Image: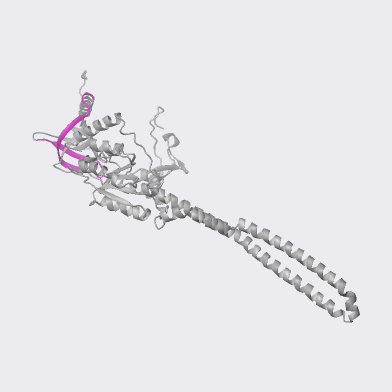
């Protein structure tokens, strides 16, 4: 590098030193002990890394610091990935830290990545069997003393109380954990009606979850004859068991909701069908009432007709008082009586046929009979789901909460919370400096209010310079 002929300013010298260091040295892996830790209100971490003979200042900015999954404190031995730079304001050499792990965690991560790549090349990550339409018996492999088991069974009691749950106990942390988890998988044949296996535990450090990165356990999960759900740690934790399993749930609670989702869906379908049957019955009820009324009216008309004819016959007989007149009219009267009886029989037969036809039509279109048939059709499902299904509102509420959180995260108000503001000129959002002129009146909208501003001078970064 050619040195300048003229004298350098201190600022120029520090900038030159920083450029040389950052250009010549790659990203370094450094181990040291944290001291003089300061957490700034901005979220940045300022500290020193030291060993027995030396120390160096270091900074880890907020974006990278948010990825640390352990408590950072003075005296903690850590391994960092950082680049060497110079803080030009003081001329101090410092480390810009990109990643931090507890000492030793780097080796664990490297071993995890090597095993993951090897098993993936062997095809052990190809399991993607779907869950059954309706889970009938769930096997849970976890520690019986852990809070995770209580969370899972509590959710299932609320959403799917009829689901039988069998716990296959196993340690989920420590030297014996991987062996006990494998042994639990070999016991699933003792529950012949089981159709889903859930392996779960709560969150923890890399070392706490390491049993789920065991190669033999991964091969046992891959060979399991039933679909396997892996729910290990928090949403940001990933283990080899997650990749080998058929389904990976973000948390044990999310796995319980996934198992019970089909039951909620079946309950919703059953409620819909019952509601449709009820509406159909209500729709045909006026028609049934009308048929009953017509039948009653027909019977009344027939009885009235018979009474009127009988009364006419008695009146005619009384008028035939003289015997000779009676003999004279006896034969025609008898003939009339026979004709009347035949006519009445014809009417009755016609009414009876009409009544039979309407009765048959009523039996064919009887909503009550249809309802009984459909109730028998769903009886088996009702027995399996009775007292076991709740509402789908919880899932919808969770989805709404998630969407609200996403909407809140992308809201301009979130940006304004960090100290930004919006400038408007006559209700027009200012995006470029060329929209402004000296003397313009502006309205600044802040997080908790607004302010009126006046433009004194406009500086532009465009080629046209200042205006």
Residue 12 vertical placement versus 448 (above, below): above
Q: Is residue 319 visible?
A: yes
Q: Is residue 24 magenta?
A: yes
Q: Nearer the viewer, residue 395 or 310?
A: 310
* Placement of the C terminus among the 4 image quadrants: top left
Q: Nearer the viewer, residue 399 or 22?
A: 399
Range shown magenta: 23-51
Q: Residue furthest left?
A: 53
* Placement of the N terminus among the 4 image quadrants: top left
Q: Nearer the viewer, residue 467 or 396?
A: 396
Residue 195 vertical placement versus 362 (above, below): above
Q: Is residue 408 magenta?
A: no
Q: Quadrant of residue 407?
A: top left
Q: Residue furthest top?
A: 2
Count of numbered circles on the image: 0
Left/right placement of residue 233 relative to residue 423 reads left
Q: Is residue 97 visible?
A: no
Q: Nearer the viewer, residue 379 or 127?
A: 379
| Residue drawn at x 89%, y 77% as measured from the top left | 327
| Residue drawn at x 64%, y 65% as measured from the top left | 292
Residue 116 x/y as whole percent:
27, 32
Residue 373 x/y as whole percent:
53, 55
Left/right placement of residue 35 relative to residue 435 reads left
Q: Quadrant of residue 455?
A: top left
Q: Quadrant of residue 440?
A: top left
Residue 406 vertical placement versus 1 (above, below): below
Residue 125 x/y as whole percent:
32, 34
Main secondary structure type of the part rendered in magenta: strand
Residue 225 x/y as whole percent:
32, 40
């Amino acid at each position: 590098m050619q040195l300048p002929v003229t004298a350098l300013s201190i600022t120029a010298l520090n900038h030159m030193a920083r450029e040389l260091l950052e250009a010549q040295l790659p990203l370094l892996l450094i181990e040291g002990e944290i001291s003089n830790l300061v957490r700034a209100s901005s979220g940045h971490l300022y500290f020193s890394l030291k060993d027995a003979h030396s120390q160096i200042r270091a900074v880890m900015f907020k974006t990278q610091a948010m990825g640390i999954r352990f408590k950072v404190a003075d005296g903690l031995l850590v391994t960092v990935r950082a680049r060497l730079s110079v803080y030009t304001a003081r001329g101090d050499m410092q480390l810009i830290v990109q990643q931090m792990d507890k000492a030793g965690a780097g080796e664990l991560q490297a071993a995890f990545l090597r095993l993951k790549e090897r098993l993936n090349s062997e095809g052990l990550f190809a399991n993607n069997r779907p869950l059954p339409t309706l889970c009938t018996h769930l096997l849970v492999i976890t520690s019986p003393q852990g809070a995770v088991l209580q969370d899972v069974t509590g959710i299932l009691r609320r959403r799917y109380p009829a689901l039988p749950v069998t716990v296959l106990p196993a340690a989920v942390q420590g030297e014996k954990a991987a062996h006990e988890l494998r042994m639990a998988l070999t016991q699933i044949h003792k529950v012949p009606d089981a159709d889903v296996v859930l392996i779960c535990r709560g969150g923890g450090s890399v070392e706490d979850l390491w049993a789920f990165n065991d190669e033999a356990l991964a091969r046992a999960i891959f060979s399991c004859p039933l679909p396997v759900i892996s729910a290990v740690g928090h949403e940001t934790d990933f283990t080899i068991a997650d990749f080998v399993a058929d389904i990976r749930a973000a948390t044990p609670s999310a796995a319980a909701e996934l198992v019970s989702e089909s039951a909620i869906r079946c309950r919703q379908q059953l409620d819909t069908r019952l509601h449709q049957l009820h509406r159909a019955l209500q729709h045909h009820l006026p028609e049934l009432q009308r048929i009953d009324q017509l039948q009653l009216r027909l019977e009344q008309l027939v009885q009235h007709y018979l009474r009127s004819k009988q009364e006419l016959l008695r009146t005619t007989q009384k008028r035939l008082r003289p015997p000779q007149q009676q003999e004279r009219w006896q034969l025609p009267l008898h003939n009339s009586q026979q004709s009347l009886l035949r006519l009445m029989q014809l009417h009755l037969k016609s009414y009876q046929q009409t009544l039979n036809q309407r009765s048959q039509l009523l039996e064919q279109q009887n909503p009550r009979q249809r309802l009984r048939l459909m109730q028998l059709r769903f009886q088996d499902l009702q027995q399996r789901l009775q007292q076991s299904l709740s509402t789908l509102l919880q899932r919808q509420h969770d989805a709404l909460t998630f969407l609200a959180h996403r909407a809140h995260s992308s809201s301009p108000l979130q940006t304004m919370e960090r100290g930004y503001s919006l400038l408007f000129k006559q209700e027009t959002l200012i995006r470029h400096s060329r929209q402004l002129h000296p003397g313009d009146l502006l309205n600044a909208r802040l997080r908790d209010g607004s302010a009126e501003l006046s433009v004194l001078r406009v500086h532009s970064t465009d080629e046209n310079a200042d205006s």
